[in-house]
Image (cartoon, grey):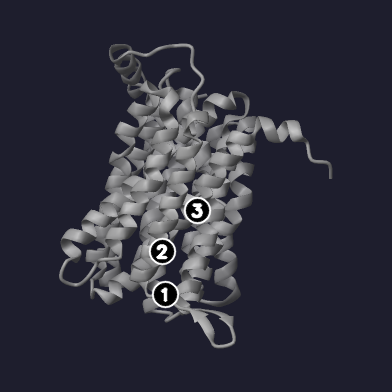
């Protein structure tokens, strides 16, 4: 197979940002694997750990508002915003490494706020850059970008689980991290990623001949906000985010507390969701560029509901592995399709704002789901969480069908 150097050159920015995005998701996905061990070590209840997860989600949502604003107003400086995303993850992991039973209320919420904000600060500038550079294949470019995220979501849990379980290097020589030590290691790696992006930040910008002032910007942003299509995409992403956050948090806790799996096995099972997303994230994006966004979103939500519901009847073995792989084909993979749809409907020049609205709305409106799921988990176990998230995804499918009909 001959390598097309010209194609690599044209897509070098896409590959660079995607590699960075995948690396960032290795770190951010490791937080979720640490949650069951933090819960056990600090003797937290399901509601308490759910409150931390909700705080993380709210912070991830709120950071999108200034991120979208800065992206649209300072199009030539978006590389600095992306670099700041990894730097905030560095600060968050440092705080996690100092968590204890005596300080978890203050330091726990603070660390999860910083981690949530850092993880989502990446999206508005990166999505707007790719939308600008690849207008004819927008969803595909976003799909490649999020495919790298899926790869990170697959590698992160595996790496985290392996390091918590212990890796044998040679004979009796092994590496075995406690969760606080691993958080410190992740902090150092995030600092390295931030530095690399900072060095290349001058090459990361958004092409635009128009110079937006604040008055013109807010006028256009308000126009986007009034569009029912944009509001619908924000709602769909909110439902998807609610399903994602509630299911993944308590699925990991379920693997530890009910199935009593090792850290490596927990990381392996969680990574399965990301593995299939590597292939299907750009695939869904490519299909939606050809057949439309809403048919793909409808199918993705419906399959998400089905696969989560079926997990209720399979608690171990090859059946669970297959269902997790199938769930990974849709749960995270339809994000670029929803994002591309939001940018399709937004007013030109405010693409960063449309992405910020998408992720802000998704995170904030979906932030209650971990707390509600935590209450259900404490009262009725993981089956109750399964029913909640499956119903939410089914509602998302119904909303998507309604939009499909209305927006024709």
The answer to whether the residues at label 3 and label 1 have Cβ atoms under 8 Å apart is: no
Q: Is residue 8 above or below residue 25?
A: above
Q: Secondary structure at mark 1?
A: loop
Q: Is residue 102 left or right of residue 351?
A: left
Q: Is residue 54 left or right of residue 29?
A: left
Q: Position of residue 214 (x, y in %)?
A: 29, 15
Identify the residue position indicated by label 3 in the image: 304
Q: Secondary structure at mark 3?
A: helix
User: Which one is closest to the eye, mark 3 or mark 1?
Assistant: 1
Q: Is residue 201 above or below residue 329?
A: above
Identify the residue position indicated by label 2 in the image: 185
Q: Considering only order in the chain, which callout, 2 or 3, is on the residue closer to the N terminus? A: 2
The answer to whether the residues at label 2 and label 1 have Cβ atoms under 8 Å apart is: yes
Most foreground residue, 223 or 134: 134
Residue density around tag 3, few if under 14, some if 14–19, many if 20 or more, within 10 Å: many
Residue 375 image-quadrant placement = bottom left
Q: Position of residue 364 (x, y in %)?
A: 29, 43
* Residue 382 appears in the picture as rendered: no
User: Which one is closest to the eye, mark 3 or mark 2?
Assistant: 2
Q: Between marks 2 and 1, how big is the CA–CA gap?
A: 9 Å
| Label placed on residue 177 | 1
């Amino acid at each position: 197979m001959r390598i097309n150097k010209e194609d690599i050159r044209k897509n070098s920015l896409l590959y660079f940002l995607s590699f960075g995005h995948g690396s960032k998701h290795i770190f951010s996905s490791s937080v979720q694997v640490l949650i069951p061990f933090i819960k056990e070590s600090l003797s937290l209840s399901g509601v308490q750990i759910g409150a931390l997860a909700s705080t993380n989600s709210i912070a991830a949502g709120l950071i999108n508002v200034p991120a979208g604003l800065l992206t649209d107003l300072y199009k030539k400086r978006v590389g600095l915003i992306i670099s700041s995303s990894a730097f905030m993850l560095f600060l968050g992991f440092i705080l996690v490494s100092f968590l204890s039973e005596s300080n978890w209320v203050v330091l726990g919420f603070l660390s999860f706020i910083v981690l949530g904000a850092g993880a989502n600060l990446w999206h508005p500038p990166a999505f707007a850059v790719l939308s600008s550079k690849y207008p004819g294949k927008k969803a595909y470019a976003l799909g490649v970008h999020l495919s790298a995220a899926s790869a990170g979501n697959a590698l992160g849990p595996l790496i985290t689980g392996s390091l918590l379980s212990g890796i044998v290097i040679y004979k009796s020589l092994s590496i075995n991290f406690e969760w606080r030590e691993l958080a410190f290691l992740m902090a150092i790696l995030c600092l390295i990623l931030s530095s690399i992006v900072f060095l290349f930040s001058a090459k990361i910008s958004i092409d635009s001949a128009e110079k937006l002032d604040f008055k013109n910007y807010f006028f256009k942003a308000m126009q986007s906000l009034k569009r029912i299509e944009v509001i619908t995409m924000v709602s769909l992403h909110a439902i998807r985010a609610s399903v994602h956050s509630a299911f993944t948090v308590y699925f990991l806790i379920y693997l530890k507390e009910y199935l009593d799996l090792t850290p490596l096995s927990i990381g392996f099972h969680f990574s399965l969701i990301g593995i299939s997303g590597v292939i299907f994230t750009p695939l869904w994006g490519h299909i939606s560029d050809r057949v439309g966004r809403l048919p793909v979103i409808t199918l993705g939500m419906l399959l998400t509901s089905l696969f989560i519901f079926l997990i209720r009847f399979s608690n171990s073995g090859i059946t669970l592995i297959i269902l997790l792989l199938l769930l990974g084909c849709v749960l995270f993979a339809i994000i670029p399709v929803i994002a591309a749809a939001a940018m399709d409907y937004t007013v030109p020049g405010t693409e960063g704002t449309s992405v910020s609205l998408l992720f802000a709305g998704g995170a904030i409106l979906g932030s209650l789901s971990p707390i509600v799921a935590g209450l259900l988990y404490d009262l009725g176990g993981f089956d109750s969480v399964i029913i909640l998230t499956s119903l939410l995804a089914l509602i998302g499918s119904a909303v998507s069908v309604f939009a499909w009909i209305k927006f024709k």
